[in-house]
Amino acid sequence: MAYFYEEPSRTFGEYLLVPGYSSAENVPTAVSLKTPLVKYRKGEEACPLEMNIPMISAIMQSVSGDKLAIALAREGGVSFIYGSQSIENEAAMVRRVKSYKAGYVVSDSNLAPTATLHDVLELKAHTGHSTIAITADGTPHGKLMGIVASRDYRVNHTPDDASVTTFMTPIEKLVTAPENTSLHDCNNIIWDNKINTLPLVDAEGNLKYFVFRKDYDSHKKNVNELLDANKSYVVGAGINTRDYAQRVPALVEAGADVLCIDSSEGYSEWQSRTIAWIREHYGDTVKVGAGNVVDAEGFRFLAKAGADFVKIGIGGGSICITRETKGIGRGQATAVIEVAKARDEYYKETGIYVPICSDGGIVHDYHITLALAMGADFVMLGRYFARFDESPTNKVRINGQYMKEYWGEGSNRARNWQRYDLGGSTKLSFEEGVDSYVPYAGPLADGVQTTLYKVKSTMCNCGALSIPELQQKAKLTVVSSTSIVEGGSHDVVLKNATPNIING
Ligand code: RVP
């Protein structure tokens, strides 16, 4: 006979935290959000890879490109570059993140000397950047011929077909520096010469990087940024259970710090085979997360298979319709609670701590605090990050409001059949995700900092200064449907009636 769970499975929205005693030391600025990303053994000095904030970005085309990866690492978290693209393109994205030295920017706006003002304006509208490198072949690392900035032309006076060579600042008039100039020295050159942009060139005059006046200041502000031993940003990458023998080596070679098997259902032989292949070829040097699972059995299976972390969640994602189409899944809160218990038991038995990640279904910022209190070491977010400037999708204006596009990996648009692979056909037979818009929310740094300030203040209310302390001290209660109504503003006529439903 089938097994029936006694309790219904619940979502985050059905729980609240009950405050504990907070002392005068419980202030948000004193809270540490450091958390392990990969497994470690009891007694080991430190986890081999920790994050400064408990957030990773979803392995999705509409979320985790190289720009978002840089912005998130700067805040202390990790992006997993989407795997539903060619191996070459995914590795190139990883390489771009790794070659990005905080403060040194590979130019993303480049034109050849044959370009015109029309091309400049088009490129500027596309990238949003006003500094354009003019290189001999129009590539980011071509021989530098000059720079075009907004002050070099007047839109209504300079003819549209004017050649960039007639109004750019030519190389002989530019202040440049050698490619290995330290950031500190670059900043001095910028100040001494009263310039905004300093191009760094190699011995042959090829453009390597730009250093911008504004970036130097922001670099100094990013106290949480997550860097590897070479001072490059930490980045993850998604893999699948089909082409790992080709994809993994390419991603490792490109410099990925951690991998994750991207699948809607992780309790499968395909995942254990993938991990076994990685262990056979790389031992423990390549870190790989697995998932997704929603119960203790699934967790134990992946932990024993050698996963470095385990992701939890089936059907809870904002763009996910797996529960509707296939009738499988589990309320996210219940799944996290059960898996966290299994993780703790596994740790007691084996001395190996396998971090767990709550993936999908975070709607309000406080859901992150709930997930952590329930035992998650960190959360994975798709919708949340898709809203920011740095996500790879278009910003569009709809009914007077700016939106960003956001689509599921199981949608017809993404066509990521490997994520739903059960070993059969190599196409997406039916959709498990939708294509949608989410309200545009500005720069990632502002959004993440506001969210985490809320998380830290709730932790203070619970008397906790770290995630493990929160997990130990948290008191959680299930709320009735009537008390959910009581939790919002009620029985008043709101002056500003815009509902706050999808922005945290
Ligand atoms: P959310 O943050 O609620 O938008 O959920 C993001 C998660 O949803 C992803 O990390 C992934 O686990 C899941 N996902 C991605 N695509 C799809 C789909 O098309 N069904 N689901």
Image (spheres, rainbow, N blue to C red):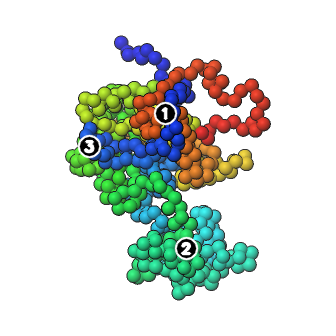
What residue occupies the far top of the structure in this picture? 1
Which quadrant holds the C terminus?
top right
Of the two numbered discs 2 and 3 on the same chain, state the one appearing first in sequence.
3
Residue 449 image position (x, y, % from top left): 55, 48
Instruction: Indicate the amino acid at tag 2.
Output: Thr
Q: Report the disc number at residue 197.
A: 2
In this figure, which residue is indicated by the disc labeled 3?
A: 44
Q: Report the disc number at residue 182.
A: none
Q: Secondary structure at mark 1?
A: loop
Q: Report the disc number at residue 463.
A: 1
Report if residue 431 is visible in the image: no
Nearest-to-viewer mark from 2 and 3: 3
Disc 3 from disc 1: Cα separation:
28 Å
For the residues bearing labels 2 and 3, Cβ distance under 8 angstroms: no
Instruction: Indicate the amino acid at tag 1.
Output: Gly
Residue 54 image position (x, y, % from top left): 45, 43
Q: How many marks?
A: 3
